[in-house]
Image (spheres, helix red, strand yellow):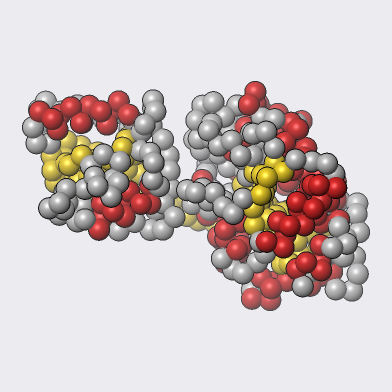
């Protein structure tokens, strides 16, 4: 909790690829070094859609200015102009029978994923998508794959205003999505294991330390960052039969950019030497620790939780939620993710310390330590 409190109250918001994110990286590096780890910052550049240079305009003298249009991460760049069509939630029965050829689709947030909304509109012929919030204020979101058309998010108030204009008559406008190039960094801390084969076997512990803009992210993901620091401290003086690597991933909120870069930077041999990746993301909210991942690791985690008399819940996956373990899983590396099952406040101004459950954090840390200390750990991965 001391790490978590410092991350929230002293470092504050750490938006991806900003100086504030860099300050967070330098703090992590300093802490890892104090534990005796070998530390390096791994910089990388990213090109991503930017709200500062993107825009949403309407034609005609009676139309208002949208307060803010935030491009979805993985939106297509470009400018699309045409008439707007409201398609509700973009469900299977919401699209017009004659399609959306040449139209800009206005969509309400909710029920189905952003990916599904944008894909359905594009397949129906839409040239751009505007998604308005189902709660006060605007929001940030990312698509799992690169969109074929520009897609932006706006506030509920602006979306409902456009709906009113559409009821009164045709509305035309343009959606412009532009990108900027930014620099981010991973923090990579390594402690060699004991034994002849330790250099060829590695366990990665990771969590992203960036937050969405203007949000200190007590749960997402100051909680996971605090856990990685705690585990690094706890394991610093242990002789494990494998090398451990603690990683703070940068720019996860822009689409897993840090973990994708890290995995891509590895040689085939280095990838194959990673016997497991343990990920910690939004761990602090809910009544019990949640886990997911490869069946062998999940089974071992549940066994250790039972022996510790800790309540934990396993799930096959999280709909519409991505995190850094995915980058490793796609490379064939066994993964185990720890999370808190209550995601209701992430990416909102209510993601504050008062809603973090210290017991859930402690339970997740205890299970993770028990997993890697277990004599069964290497064998379940063979």
Q: Residue at x 50, y 35 (%)?
A: 347
Asked whether the viewer can see residue 212, the reply is: yes
Q: Is residue 380 left or right of residue 19?
A: right
Q: Is residue 18 left or right of residue 231?
A: left
* Rendering quarter of residue 211: top right
Q: Residue furthest top?
A: 354
> From the viewer's perspective, is residue 3 above or below residue 123?
above
Q: Residue at x 53, y 33 (%)?
A: 344
* Rendering quarter of residue 34: top right
Q: Residue at x 35, y 38 (%)?
A: 109
Q: Looking at the picture, how far across and down is residue 8, in whole percent?
A: 64, 30
Q: Quadrant of the N terminus?
A: top right
Q: Residue furthest bottom?
A: 269
Q: Residue at x 28, y 45 (%)?
A: 90
Counting every numbered tag in the picture gives: 0
> From the viewer's perspective, is residue 66 above or below residue 124?
above
Q: Looking at the picture, how far across and down is residue 170, in whole percent?
A: 9, 36
* Depth check, front residue: 277 or 225: 277
* Depth check, front residue: 99 or 1: 99
> From the viewer's perspective, is residue 330 above or below residue 42?
below
Q: Quadrant of the C terminus?
A: bottom right
* Depth check, front residue: 300 or 36: 300
Q: Looking at the picture, how far across and down is residue 187, in whole percent?
A: 67, 51
Asked whether the viewer can see residue 19, the reply is: no
Q: Is residue 351 left or right of residue 138?
A: right
* Depth check, front residue: 56 or 95: 95
């Amino acid at each position: 909790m001391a790490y978590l409190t410092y991350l929230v109250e002293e470092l504050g918001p750490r938006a991806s690829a900003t100086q504030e994110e860099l300050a967070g990286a330098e703090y992590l590096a300093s802490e890892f070094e104090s534990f005796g780890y070998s530390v390096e910052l791994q910089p990388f550049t990213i090109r991503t859609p930017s709200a500062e240079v993107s825009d949403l305009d309407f034609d005609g003298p009676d139309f208002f200015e949208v307060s803010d249009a935030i491009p979805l991460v993985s939106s297509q760049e470009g400018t699309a102009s045409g008439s707007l069509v409201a398609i509700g939630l973009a469900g299977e029965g919401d699209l017009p029978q004659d399609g959306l050829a040449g139209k800009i689709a206005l969509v309400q947030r909710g029920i189905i994923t952003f990916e599904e909304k944008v894909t359905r509109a594009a397949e129906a012929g839409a040239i751009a998508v505007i998604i308005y919030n189902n709660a006060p204020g605007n929001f940030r979101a990312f698509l799992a794959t690169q969109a074929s058309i520009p897609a932006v998010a706006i506030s509920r108030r602006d979306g409902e205003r456009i709906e009113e204009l559409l009821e009164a008559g045709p509305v035309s406008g343009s959606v412009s999505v532009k990108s900027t190039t930014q620099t981010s960094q991973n923090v990579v801390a390594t402690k060699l294991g004991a034994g002849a084969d330790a250099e060829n076997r590695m366990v990665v512990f990771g969590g992203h330390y960036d937050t969405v803009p203007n949000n200190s992210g007590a749960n997402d993901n100051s909680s996971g960052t605090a856990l990685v620091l705690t585990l690094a401290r706890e394991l610093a003086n242990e002789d494990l039969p494998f090398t451990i690597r603690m990683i703070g991933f940068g720019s996860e909120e822009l689409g897993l950019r840090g973990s994708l870069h890290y995995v891509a930077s590895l040689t085939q041999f280095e990838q194959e030497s990673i016997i497991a990746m343990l990920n910690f993301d939004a761990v602090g909210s809910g009544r019990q620790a949640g886990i997911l991942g490869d069946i062998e690791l999940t089974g071992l985690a549940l066994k250790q939780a039972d022996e510790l008399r800790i309540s934990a819940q396993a799930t096959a996956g999280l709909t519409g939620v991505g995190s850094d373990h995915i980058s490793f899983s796609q490379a064939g590396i066994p993964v185990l993710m720890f999370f808190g099952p209550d995601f209701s406040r992430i990416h909102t101004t209510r993601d504050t310390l008062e809603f973090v459950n210290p017991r859930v954090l402690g339970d997740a840390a205890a299970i993770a330590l028990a997993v890697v200390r277990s004599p069964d750990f290497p064998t379940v991965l063979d």
